[in-house]
Image (tube, rainbow, N blue to C red):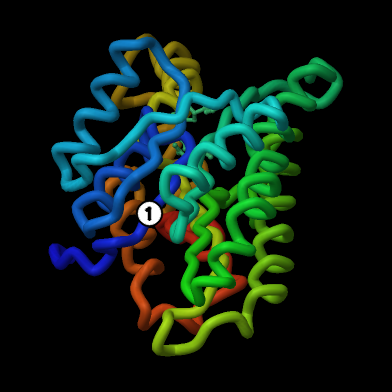
Amino acid sequence: MSDRFLEGRTALVTGATSGIGLAIAQALAAAGARVAVNGLGSQAQVAQALASVQAAGSPEARHFGADLSDTAAVEDMMAQIAAWSPADVLVNCAGVQHAVPIAQMPAATWDRLIAINLSAAFHTMRLAMPGMAERGFGRVVNIASVHGLVASVNKSPYVASKFGLIGLSKVAGLEYAAAGSRESGGITVNCVCPGWVETPLIEPQIVARAEAAGGDRDAGIRELLREKQPSQRMSLPEEIAALVVWLCRKEAHNLTGAAIPVDGGWTAQ
Ligand code: NAD
């Protein structure tokens, strides 16, 4: 997938300073897109992420540091991007996790997870999609999770946000299904639903399992996989990114409203 078929297009990737979002931003840059990199982190982390996206093929890539839990900040970011170069590809990848039982879940944590994992995607979509329709081409890829398809204990706001994200994506897929044409590429909205992917997000869960296994990290990872993921293999961020890039191709114009698991068989059970 080395051709630069996204040359002349702009892609906004949220949560692109780490993990899956960073790999997606790099892959879209390699496919020719001008990339708007959103995400938080230390100055050094942001600078490193941005430089890697520029080096991957988007010398004009810019960082937009909006905190997605703040609606006004999202609106301001979208206005800045519209003035810079409106997004033809929107990847909502920013996400956070907090794993405790419902009775111990702080109300503020619920609000924060729903805001970042779900409401921010609503705001970026409502602001970016009318322009996509005018131009006849647009791709929205929302990084949901297997936890948008099945539940696990201790993840109430996470699971609720991901089920919500899949529902939101189906509505938007329907609303924009007839926009554009095969020639222009049309507008599609899909969710990618990864199982375990080795990134900083799941590190606390690896550490907890490793502690239970006497401090053996590999044993902690094996235990996570044994529970849920029949392939017994973690996905790599760049594998998720390769699917996102494919969804941006014109020949994917009729793939919309889908929730695509990349989960080693987790949700096939
Ligand atoms: P990560 O922790 O490596 O990256 C999260 C990104 O979100 C970072 O760039 C961070 O800066 C950004 N972010 C967090 N809060 C933000 C805020 N308030 N405003 C702006 N940006 C913010 O995590 P990851 O594993 O790469 O996760 C990316 C997405 O993939 C998430 O939506 C996650 O739910 C989903 N996912 C991950 C896994 C996995 O196993 N890692 C599995 C399924 C789904």
- Locate residue 99: give its quadrant: top right
Please, which residue is most extreme toward the front here? Answer: 83
Quadrant of the drawing holding the N terminus: bottom left
Q: Position of residue 76 (x, y in %)?
A: 62, 32
Hey, what amino acid is under mark 1? Answer: Thr
Q: Position of residue 180 (x, y in %)?
A: 53, 82
- Residue marked by disc 1: 10
| Horizontal relation, residue 167 to residue 98: left or right | right
User: In front here: 127 or 266?
Assistant: 127
Residue at (72, 58) in percent of width and height: 168
Residue 145 shows in the view: yes
Residue at (24, 62) in percent of width and height: 7
Q: Is mark 1 within 8 Å of ligand 1?
A: no
Q: Position of residue 236 (x, y in %)?
A: 29, 44
| Horizontal relation, residue 52 to residue 210: left or right | left
User: In front here: 122 or 195?
Assistant: 122
Quadrant of the drawing holding the C terminus: bottom right
User: In front here: 258 or 22?
Assistant: 22
Q: Where is 221 relative to 193, above or below?
A: above
- Locate residue 47: give its quadrant: top left
